[in-house]
Amino acid sequence: MKRIMNRWVLAAVCIAVVADFAPADVEAQEARRRWDRMGQMRREKFDLVLPGVMRENEIDMWITVRKEGLDDPLTADFGLGYVNPIGYYIFTDRGDERIERAALGINGYLLAENGAYDIVTSNFDLKAFVAERDPRRIGLNMGENIGAADGLSYTTYHMLVETLGEPYASRLVSAEKLVSDFRSRRVTSELAGFAEAGEISRELAERALSNEVITPGVTALEDVAWWLMDRLLERGLGSSFGFPSIYITGPDGVEAVSNDRIIQGGDVMMIDWGVCHLNFCTDMKRVAYVLRPGETEAMPGVQNAFDRALEARAVSRKAIRPGITARENMDRIGAALTEAGFNPIPFNEPTDGPMTDVTWEGHHSVGNLGHGIGPSIALWNPRRVTFDVVPSNLLSIELFAYTAIPEWGGAKLRVPLEDDAVVTERGAEWLYPANSRLLLIKSGPSTRVTT
């Protein structure tokens, strides 16, 4: 009887395993859903964005090169495919409304079936292909200032010069600005995908800074970071910046970051991180206060500092406008903060005065990378601060507000705020619920879970 029962158990297990791989589950495949969505984004981007940015940058042909084992940063944008030993994504303006799209030497189901290309072939002569189209200016991914626009290697550049010969070798130019414009000008399906990534990153960050994960006196900063890394693995997501930054700020500034420091009552905690999903990467922050035993709300000085940061963010966001350069937007924001009673300062140089100091020169581009490559209202992007801000650009609205804390003897707390927004004709609009409250972590019995 026992042997018969074991056979029934084994049969049940086999049925369950087979059911997991049954054809009925094909329609539920997450990988296919994501591929379908990215294919939609790619086709719409090629139709609606590519013609305008190629003509604006006066580039007749744009060549992006892939080698086996050496992908260009734009590979996911253009579509994954098999390449051996070398392949090309080539976009040609032949005077029609539609830009011709060709994948030469790049093939496979994922690329061929997404419907984005007019030509997908491994049978080609690159020199003849270019000569037939006779472009006046050929853009290559060479970028002095933008890393994601600098995918062409030194040896591949010289190979192209030799292969194409004259007159085309003399017509090769940098496509740096074209790459920035192509990536940073968004179609609606992209905005929907990025908003989804933003909502995921927000949800996980707020769970991480809660008693679901943290038990004061027990949990270390690195434990919180590793909990987030496990959630990324579970959901098939990437990370914008590697290991999440989980840190504590006190009267003397940042005390510890993602290490073995144990979280205690009275700590002011921050998280700086983002997730990668559908070829998008977010960049955001959240702030929490760890209640001491007996406390039911945050220390008044900390709550006031957080509220002042929210006020500064509202002023800053309202000042952003399309149709002017990122530099001009930066000046508008600084003037608006001053008028509202804040003190604009360089990064991490707070004053001893009573005013709330604000570092505002960090509203950077975001999108396919946590730090994107479009127009950027950030001083660390000296080239891109000269680019025009246009509707559909994505910005990470990031600022730091420094407000005196009476309970700390007047020392200032640096409150970081950062969430992702899209520029519209009306200004900057959030793509998911932006940070609006100081999170509270309770002391007391553990409610921590590990999954």
Image (tube, rainbow, N blue to C red):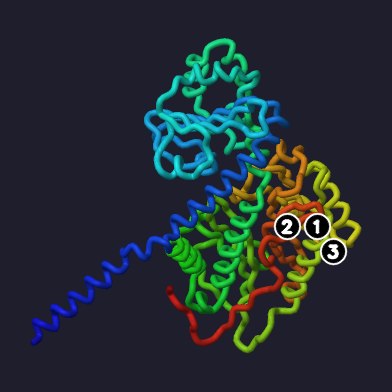
Quarter of the image that includes the C terminus: bottom left
Quarter of the image that includes the N terminus: bottom left
Q: Determine whether the residue tagged by mark 3 lies in a helix, strand or loop.
A: loop
Q: Determine whether the residue tagged by mark 1 lies in a helix, strand or loop.
A: helix
Q: Nearer the viewer, mark 1 or mark 3?
A: 1
Tell me the crowding category of disc 3: few under 14, some 14 to 19, or many 20 or more residues within 10 angstroms, Cα based. some
Residue at point 76% right, 65% down? 309
CB-based contact (under 8 Å), mark 1 and mark 2: yes
Mark 3 / mark 2, whichever is N-terminal: 3
Residue type beneath disc 2: Leu
Residue at point 53% right, 48% down? 39
User: Which residue is disc 1 drawn over?
Assistant: 316
Looking at the image, the residue that sits furthest to the right is 339
Q: Which mark is residue 399?
A: 2
Q: Is residue 157 visible?
A: yes
Q: Position of residue 59 (x, y in %)?
A: 66, 26
Tell me the crowding category of disc 1: few under 14, some 14 to 19, or many 20 or more residues within 10 angstroms, Cα based. many
Q: Position of residue 49 (x, y in %)?
A: 67, 40
Tell me the crowding category of disc 2: few under 14, some 14 to 19, or many 20 or more residues within 10 angstroms, Cα based. many
Q: Position of residue 421 (x, y in %)?
A: 70, 57
Residue at point 71% right, 79% down? 299
Residue at point 82% right, 55% down? 426
Residue type beneath disc 1: Ser
Label count reads: 3
Q: Position of residue 4 (x, y in %)?
A: 10, 82
In-front residue for pair 3/46: 46
